[in-house]
Image (cartoon, rainbow, N blue to C red):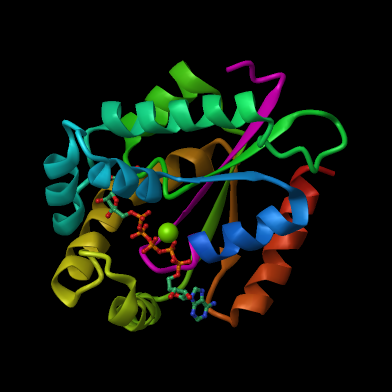
Amino acid sequence: FDANKITVLFVLGGPGAGKGTQCANLVKDFGFCHLSAGDLLRAEQNRPGSTYGEMIRTYIKEGQIVPMEVTVKLLENAMKDALAEGREGEGWADGRGRFLIDGFPRKMDQAVMFDEQVCPSSMVLFFTTTEDEMLKRLLERGKTSGREDDNEESIKKRFHVYKEQTMPVIEHYNKLHKVAEIDATATIDEVHEKAKVVVAKIFA
Ligand code: UP5
Ligand code: MG
C-alpha cells in the first residue's frame, strides 16, 4: 500500500479495555475503515473450508497470538477489499484512506512485518484501564457474547500474553513518540470524548 494514499492508526490496549467500542464511535465521527484483527480471525475460523479454522480456535481459546503470516494476510486482504469498494474512510477531506487497525500488532514480529511489508503505521491509540475493570467487563460480556475466550481461565491467559508480548510493542512505538494514551476507565461516552480530541489532533 502507498503510504501517501492511506493512513493507518493502530488501536491497542488490554483485553476488554474498550478498543472495539471506541473504534465504532470513531468511525461515526471520522469515517475511518475499522478492521479488528480478532474479528477477522474469528470470521476466518468460521469460514467453511478454511485450512486455519481449528488452529485459530485453539490459539484464541488459549489467548495465544496466531502466527503473524495468517493475521497479516487477513488484514492485507481486508484493506484491499475496502480500497476496492471505496470504504477506506471517505469522510476525510484530503482524499487519503484512513484505517483503524484494532487489536493489532500484539507482538513485535507482527509490528515489524506490517510496518515494513504492508504500510508504515502513523500512530497508536492506546486505551488503558485496570485489570479488575477489564475482567469485570469481559465476564459481563461473556454472558451473551458467545466468545470462547470470554471465560475467567482464558481471560487470565489473555492478560498474561498482553503483558509479556504486547506491552513491548507499546514501548517500541512509545520510543518513536507514536503512542497516544487514553484513559478508558470512565463511561463509554466520556472515553469517546477524549478519543475524539486525540484523533482530531493527529489529523490537525
Ligand atoms: N465496555 C467497553 N467500554 C466500556 C466502558 N468505558 N465502561 C464500561 N463498559 C465498557 O469492550 C469489552 C466489553 O466492555 C464490552 O461488553 C463493552 O460494552 C464494555 P470491547 O470494546 O469489546 O473491548 P476490546 O478492547 O475490543 O476487547 P476484546 O475482548 O475485543 O479485546 P482482545 O484484545 O482480547 O480481543 P481481540 O478480538 O482483539 O483478540 C482476541 C484473540 O485473537 C487474542 O487473544 C488472540 O488469541 C487473537 N489475536 C491474534 O492472535 N492476533 C492478533 O493480531 C489479534 C488477535
Ligand atoms: Mg475487540
Give the residues in magenta: 1-19
Task: Give me the residue at 42% from left, 43% from top.
Answer: 104
Residue 189 in picture, x, y percent from top left: 67, 77
Queried whether the magenta region covers residue 11, the answer comes back as: yes
Q: Position of residue 157 (x, y in %)?
A: 17, 62
Q: Is residue 109 above or below residue 127?
A: above
Compared across the picture, whether 78 is left or right of 142 comes to: right
Q: Is residue 190 above or below residue 115?
A: below
Among the 4 quarters of the image, the one containing residue 176 = top right
Who's the residue at 72% across and 52% down the image? 199
Instruction: Count the labels in the image.
Output: 0
Quadrant location, the C terminus:
top right
Name the outermost residue toward the front.
48
Q: Is residue 182 visible?
A: yes
Task: Residue 70: give x, y in percent of width and height.
Answer: 28, 30
Residue 135 appears in the figure: no
Left or right? Give the position of 78 relative to 188. Answer: left
Residue in the foreground of this view, choosing between 77 and 169: 77
Quarter of the rendering occupied by the N terminus: top right
Asked whether 194 falls inside the magenta stretch, the response is no
Residue found at x 29% / y 40%: 44
Q: Nearer the viewer, residue 86 or 103?
A: 86
Q: Residue at x 12, y 43 (%)?
A: 54
Q: Position of residue 7 (x, y in %)?
A: 66, 32
Q: Is 61 on the left-hand or right-hand side of 117?
A: left
**Which image quadrant shows ligand 1?**
bottom left
